[in-house]
Image (cartoon, rainbow, N blue to C red):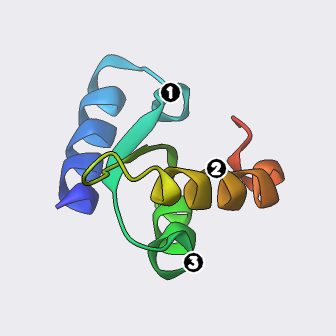
Amino acid sequence: DFARKSSILDRYCAQIGRNPDEIERSVLVGGEPENSGPRLLAQGIRLFIVSTRDLDLAPVANWVRWRDEHNGQLSAT
């Protein structure tokens, strides 16, 4: 669903002459970042909103660790 919405955003940007790379793209994530993080990063997503359950912050810590390890790839272009 993200890819479809992202392409719509890209088309609107082209219509008004805006650089789509200036828009920070975000997505709700869960699970282990190693499973989905690289694919999401390749799609241009730079902001990861972590879903948690029962106030367990371990998933947040995992995503922050992954983010820090891939920080060069997460920098704005």
> For the residue marked with disc 1, what is the amino acid?
Asn
Q: Name the residue located 39 percent from the left edge and 41 percent from the top edge.
A: 26
Q: Could you tell me how far apart the alpha carbons at marks 3 and 2 are, in whole angstroms?
A: 12 Å
Whole-percent x and y of residue 70?
A: 76, 59
Which of label 3 and label 2 is nearer to you? 2
**Secondary element at tag 1:** loop
Q: Nearer the viewer, residue 27 or 55?
A: 55
Circles 1 and 2: CB atoms closer than 8 Å: no
- The quadrant in which the N terminus is found is bottom left
Answer with mark 3 or mark 2, whichever residue precedes in sequence: 3
Q: Which residue is mark 1?
A: 19
Name the quadrant containing residue 22.
top right
- Please say if 11 is above or below 28: above
- Identify the mark at residue 64; answer none if there is no mark: 2
**Secondary element at tag 3:** helix
- Identify the mark at residue 34; answer none if there is no mark: 3
Q: Name the residue located 51 percent from the left edge and 58 percent from the top edge.
A: 58
In the displayed structure, does residue 34 sit left or right of residue 52? right
> For the residue marked with disc 2, what is the amino acid?
Val
Name the quadrant containing residue 75.
top right
- Please say if 35 is above or below 44: below
